[in-house]
Image (tube, grey):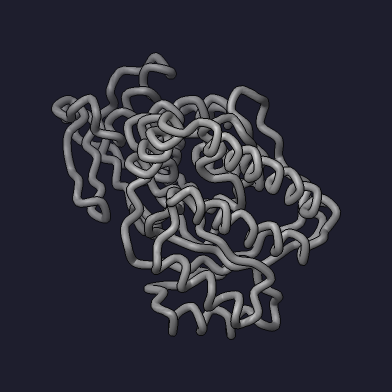
C-alpha cells in the first residue's frame, strides 16, 4: 500500500581526516553536516504512468523506464525496487538539495539516500540503515568509480564515524561538542578524477604514497583519540598536519591553501581541505567565540559561502 505523499531527507557530510588514504585501506573520520540536506518527496501519479524523477536542482528530469543505466538517481530507484522486490510504482519523485555539487559535501550520496528512503516509505517499507548503506554505496560507484564508502556511511547513519574499508562501521564517541566552519572555494571538485589521479601516482611511486597514506592513517587514529577524550586543541593541530600531507600528495589548490591560511590567521584551532581536493571545500575548527570572525576571514579570502555546523557530543 502506498501513501499519497511521502518525504524523506539526508544530510551532507565532511571528511574530518583521512581523505584519499581511506581509499587505500587507511582510516578516515567523517561527520554529518545537518545544515544542508537533500530531500525526496513522492506523490501518487496516474495509473500506468510509472515512476518519474524530477531533480530541478540537478537539471535532471526523466522517467525511470527510459533512464540510462548510469543515471545515478535511476540506479538508486532501481536498486531500491529490486531489494524490495517491488514493481515500479506510479509516482513522481521530486528531489531537491541545498548541498553544493562537487564540493566534498556528499551531494551524490545524500540525494541517493533521500530517494531510497522516500521510495521505500512510499511502498510501505522501512529498511535498516545497513541495508540503505549497501544500496547507496552501489550508486556511489557511478559517481566516483572506486569510492571509499565513507560518504554513504556517515550520511546514512547521520553520526560521526570512524571508517576503514573491509571493517565494521564504528560510530565515534564525541566527548566534547565542537564547531566547524565549511568554506567553499567555489571551484568544482571532481572526486572521481582526483581519486584516479592519486591512484595513478601511487602506482608510479608506491613507496612514497604508501608512506603518505600511513602518516595520514596515524594522524587520523590520533584524532580519534582526541575526539574521544575531548581534546579539541589536539584535534585542530592534527587537522592542520593532515592538510600538509594532502598538499604533499598534490590534491590541494591555491584557493584551498589561501582559505586554510586565512582561517588559521584568524584564530582557528586547525584547518584543512575536506574531500577530494583541487577545489570544493575546506574546514576550520573554531572556538565558538571566534567562529564568526573566522567565517568573515574566510569570506574575505575568497570563500563563496561558509557553513557553520556543530558536531554534537554523543555521551
Residue 145's image quarter?
top left
Q: Nearer the viewer, residue 238 or 78?
A: 238
63, above or below 258, in the image: above
Q: Left or right: 149 with respect to 172?
A: left
Residue 42: image location, x then y, percent:
34, 41
Residue 263: image location, x then y, percent:
56, 75
263, above or below 206, in the image: below
Residue located at (34% from left, 66% from top): 186
Residue lying furthest left? 66
Residue located at (18% from left, 43% from top): 61
Residue located at (43% from left, 48% from top): 276
Residue 299: image location, x then y, percent:
44, 80
- Which corner quadrant holds the N terminus? top left
Q: Nearer the viewer, residue 201 or 163?
A: 201
Task: Look at the image and tell me whether residue 122 can be seen.
Answer: no
Q: Left or right: 105 with respect to 271?
A: left
53, above or below 278, in the image: above
Residue lying furthest top? 85
Q: Nearer the viewer, residue 86 or 20?
A: 20
306, above or below 33, in the image: below
Residue 164: image location, x then y, percent:
63, 32
Residue 4's image quarter?
top left
Amino acid at each position: 500500500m502506498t501513501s499519497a505523499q511521502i518525504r524523506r531527507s539526508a544530510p551532507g557530510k565532511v571528511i574530518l581526516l583521512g581523505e584519499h588514504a581511506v581509499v587505500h585501506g587507511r582510516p578516515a573520520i567523517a561527520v554529518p553536516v545537518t545544515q544542508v540536506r537533500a530531500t525526496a518527496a513522492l506523490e501518487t501519479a496516474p495509473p500506468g504512468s510509472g515512476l518519474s524523477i524530477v531533480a530541478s536542482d540537478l537539471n535532471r528530469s526523466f522517467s525511470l523506464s527510459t533512464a540510462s543505466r548510469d543515471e545515478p538517481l535511476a540506479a538508486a530507484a532501481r536498486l531500491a525496487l529490486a531489494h524490495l522486490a517491488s514493481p515500479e510504482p506510479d509516482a513522481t519523485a521530486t528531489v531537491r538539495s541545498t548541498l553544493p555539487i562537487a564540493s566534498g559535501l556528499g551531494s551524490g550520496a545524500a540525494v541517493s539516500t533521500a530517494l531510497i528512503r522516500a521510495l521505500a516509505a512510499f511502498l510501505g517499507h522501512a529498511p535498516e540503515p545497513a541495508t540503505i548503506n549497501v544500496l547507496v554505496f552501489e550508486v556511489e560507484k557511478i559517481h566516483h568509480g572506486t569510492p571509499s564508502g565513507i560518504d554513504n556511511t556517515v550520511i546514512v547513519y547521520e553520526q560521526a564515524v570512524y571508517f576503514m574499508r573491509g571493517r565494521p562501521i564504528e560510530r565515534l564517541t564525541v566527548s566534547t561538542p565542537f564547531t566547524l566552519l565549511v568554506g567553499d572555494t567555489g571551484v568544482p571538485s571532481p572526486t572521481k578524477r582526483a581519486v584516479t589521479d592519486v591512484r595513478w601516482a601511487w602506482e608510479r611511486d608506491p613507496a612514497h604514497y604508501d608512506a603518505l597514506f600511513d602518516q595520514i592513517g596515524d594522524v587520523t587514529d590520533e584524532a580519534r583519540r582526541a575526539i574521544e577524550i575531548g581534546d579539541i586543541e589536539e584535534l585542530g593541530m592534527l587537522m592542520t598536519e593532515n592538510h600538509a600531507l594532502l598538499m604533499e600528495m598534490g590534491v590541494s589548490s591555491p584557493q584551498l591553501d589561501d582559505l586554510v591560511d586565512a582561517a588559521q590567521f584568524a584564530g582557528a584551532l586547525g584547518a584543512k581541505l575536506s574531500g577530494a581536493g583541487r577545489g570544493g571545500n575546506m574546514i576550520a575548527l573554531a572556538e565558538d567565540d571566534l567562529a564568526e570572525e573566522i567565517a568573515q576571514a574566510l569570506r574575505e579570502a575568497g570563500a563563496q559561502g561558509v557553513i557553520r555546523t556543530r558536531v554534537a557530543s554523543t555521551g
